[in-house]
Every structure is written in structure tokens, then in C-alpha cells.
Image: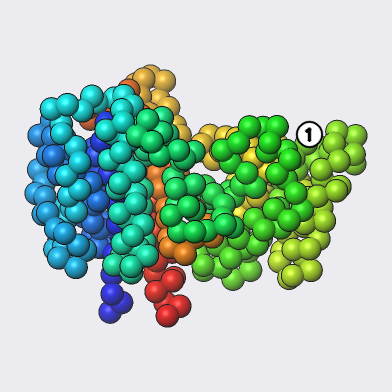
């Protein structure tokens, strides 16, 4: 019998929905069939939401993963002891919340780098809160890259088998255009190819988006495709990869949804995020509530595995009991897949 992989789950910003969806997720018996999950967070916060939401579960405080029980009905927690619930303001940014959220991320990265866990899964943090705490990062992706000394990396979003990677993410649209260089596009195509192989896809089919309307229309609407993107695609083909493009995005994403590609390379943040969230985020107008919030955010190119929910802290939902755990469940599933693939390599 194969050994279960151990997954470290950060609690996210304590003022957001991270604690609630963590509890809801680990009340699913299937999670313990997939892996050994351990939470890095604050027991005081989890206890607060257990009582508020009337959740029947026990917490087991440990100092390291090897001490955990990994038994359904008991949630193993590495208690960082950073949050005072008497002073924390729920549903808003604060330096205290940002400091705690950053500390959870740093701890889970250290555990992975020291091979105490097989993969990391992150709950939502607030960029505003971590910056109030003095940690000047644009988000999880940049924190992971910095703390693991990684130079070549990219963000991948996934909704089941619909996968998107990005040439650039948290920069202005003007800067994003400048970053669509041959070197960077080829780098992201290569990372995408390797990611699919790690997911067990033997011959990944990669679709590459154009930057300009109609992929530049032969130079009428811009020259980036001719000067940068097409040379990158040709270089990838010379390396033996199966690559199509540049395809106009309004055609590329419907093709990807239809199964033409295993992964798509988007040129900038919103080009990739919008189609994926259109699939994964479903709002019920009649009920006035989100019916589903699915999707996974994965940082590729790191020496460790990192997957995450594909949504924010949802401050407006904190304490209502309505927060959906689907994205976190999906993130754990992807983390397990990647961890098992890596374990089998050794």
C-alpha cells in the first residue's frame, strides 16, 4: 500500500473565510482517504469558528507533523499562537491579521523545504493586510518565490482539466505588454509542459494566446506576436513540444474548454483569470448566493509544491456560515496529485 502524502494547509488571514472553509473541508471524510492533512494556524481562531458555526470537531495541537494523528474527526493543528480573538476585527484588513497570515505561509514553506510535509496548500490572504504588517509582496506567488529563492516561476489556474498559466500576473497592463518577450513566453511554455507531465499527461497539448486582438492580425494591431510570441512557439516546437498559436483568446479559451488543449498560456493576469472564473464561480440569482466557487491556484517552478484556493478573503461572508469550501477541496486534490507524482519519482 502506498504511503499517504502529508499536506500542510495554512489557515489564511484569520479575519477572512480561511478558518471557516478549513474546518468545513476537514469535516469531509474523503480528505483523510486522500492524504494526511495538517493545519498551520491559530487554535484560538479555529475554536472561535467551531463555536460560532456549531461544528462538531476536535482539535489536536502538535508542534510538528510527525506528532499528528491524521484521523477523521480530529483536526491536527500547529498552533502559531499569534491571534488574540478579543482584539481581532473580523472582515477587515489589519496588521495583526496580515502578520499572522504571513507567518503561517513562512512556516508551511519551511516545513516543505525540510521535507516534513509533501505539499503546501494555502488559504486566502489579504495583500492589504500583509503590507500593513510590513511584508511588501503582491501575493502568495511572490512570497513563495522569494522564500524559496526561485527566479523562474509562473501561476497556473485550474478548474478540473481546464488549466491556464500566465506570462505575467500582478503588474499593470502596460507593463504586462512589455513582459511578453520571446524568452519569457518560451519559459512559461516550458514550465507548462513540465507541469502537465507531472500530472501524468504524457504528451501535453499547449495552446498559446495572442496578446493583441485577433493575435495582431498579421501586424495590423500590434507586432508582439510576430516579433516575440511566434518565435517562442517555434523554439518550443524545436524542443519537441506540441504547441499551437498564437490563437486569438476569444477562440483559444472555447477550444480549451472543448478539450483541444491540456493547458493554455495566457499573456497577462485578466486574460487567464476571467475565463477560468467564469467557469468556476457560479452565482445563484434567485438565492442571492454563490452556488459554487471552484478553482485552484498553483505556483509552478518552485522546489516545493504549492496549491491554493482561487479566491480572496471574502470579508463580506465572514461568520455567516455561507463560505464554500469547494476551492480548498480542489486545491488539496491537486496538491495530492502533484505530491504523489513527485513521491513516485524517488
Dot 1 alpha-carbon crowd within 10 angstroms: few under 14, some 14 to 19, many 20 or more:
some
Q: In this view, does 63 lie above or below 93?
A: below
Callout 1: helix, strand or loop? helix
Q: What is the x, y in percent for residue 224?
A: 81, 43
Q: How is the image coloured?
A: rainbow
Is 48 left, or right, of 283 in this rendering? left
Quadrant housing the C terminus: bottom left
Q: In this view, does 224 lie to the left or right of 17?
A: right
Q: Which of 287 and 177 is in front in this view?
A: 177
Please say whether residue 276 is visible from this viewpoint. yes
Quadrant of the rendered image containing residue 8? bottom left
Q: How many labels does the image show?
A: 1
- Residue found farthest to the front: 134
Question: Which residue corresponds to the image point at 62% horizontal and 63% vertical from the top-left?
Answer: 193
Identity of the residue drawn at 58% across and 48% down: 164
Closest to the observer: 175 or 326? 175
Instruction: Provide residue 116's location: percent of width, then percent of height.
Output: 29, 67
Look at mark 1 in the image and give the residue it sits on.
213
Say if 41 sits above or below 30 in the image. Answer: above
* Residue plotted at (31% across, 62% down): 111
Q: Pick whichever, 233 or 279, lies toward us.
A: 233
Residue 255 placement (x, y as % from top left)? 67, 47
Residue 293 visible from this viewpoint: no
Q: In this view, does 134 lie to the left or right of 273?
A: left
Locate residue 114, reporting x and y percent: 33, 67
Left or right of 169 in this view: 287: left
Q: Quadrant of residue 91?
A: top left
* Image point (45%, 78%), residue name: 345
Q: In which quarter of the image is the N terminus?
A: bottom left
Q: Quadrant of residue 304?
A: bottom left
| Pick the front one: 293 or 340 | 340
Amino acid at each position: 500500500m502506498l504511503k499517504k502524502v502529508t499536506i500542510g494547509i495554512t489557515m489564511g488571514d484569520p479575519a477572512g473565510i480561511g478558518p471557516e472553509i478549513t474546518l468545513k473541508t476537514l469535516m469531509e471524510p474523503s480528505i483523510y482517504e486522500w492524504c494526511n492533512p495538517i493545519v498551520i494556524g491559530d487554535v484560538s481562531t479555529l475554536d472561535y469558528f467551531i463555536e460560532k458555526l456549531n461544528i462538531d470537531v476536535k482539535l489536536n495541537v502538535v508542534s510538528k507533523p510527525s506528532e499528528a494523528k491524521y484521523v477523521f474527526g480530529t483536526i491536527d493543528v500547529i498552533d502559531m499562537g499569534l491571534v488574540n480573538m478579543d482584539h481581532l476585527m473580523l472582515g477587515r484588513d489589519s496588521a495583526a491579521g496580515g502578520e499572522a497570515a504571513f507567518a503561517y505561509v513562512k512556516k508551511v514553506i519551511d516545513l516543505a523545504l525540510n521535507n516534513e510535509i509533501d505539499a503546501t496548500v494555502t488559504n486566502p490572504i489579504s495583500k492589504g493586510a500583509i503590507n500593513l504588517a510590513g511584508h511588501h509582496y503582491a501575493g502568495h506567488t511572490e512570497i513563495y518565490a522569494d522564500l524559496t529563492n526561485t527566479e523562474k516561476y509562473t501561476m497556473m489556474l485550474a478548474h478540473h482539466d481546464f488549466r491556464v498559466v500566465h506570462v505575467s500576473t500582478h503588474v499593470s497592463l502596460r507593463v504586462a505588454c512589455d513582459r511578453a518577450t520571446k524568452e519569457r513566453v518560451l519559459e512559461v511554455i516550458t514550465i507548462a509542459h513540465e507541469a502537465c507531465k507531472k500530472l501524468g499527461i504524457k504528451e501535453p497539448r499547449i495552446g498559446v494566446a495572442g496578446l493583441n486582438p485577433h493575435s495582431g492580425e498579421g501586424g495590423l494591431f500590434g507586432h508582439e506576436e510576430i516579433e516575440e510570441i511566434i518565435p517562442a512557439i517555434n523554439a518550443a516546437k524545436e524542443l519537441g513540444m506540441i504547441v499551437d498559436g498564437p490563437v486569438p483568446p476569444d477562440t483559444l479559451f472555447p477550444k480549451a474548454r472543448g478539450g483541444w488543449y491540456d493547458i493554455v498560456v495566457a499573456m497577462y493576469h485578466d486574460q487567464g483569470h476571467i475565463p477560468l472564473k467564469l467557469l468556476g464561480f457560479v452565482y445563484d440569482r434567485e438565492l442571492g448566493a454563490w452556488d459554487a466557487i471552484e478553482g485552484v491556484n498553483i505556483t509552478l517552478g518552485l522546489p516545493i509544491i504549492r496549491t491554493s484556493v482561487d479566491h480572496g478573503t471574502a470579508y463580506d461572508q465572514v461568520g455567516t456560515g455561507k463560505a464554500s469550501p469547494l476551492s480548498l477541496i480542489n486545491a488539496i486534490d491537486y496538491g495530492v496529485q502533484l505530491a504523489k507524482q513527485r513521491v513516485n519519482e524517488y
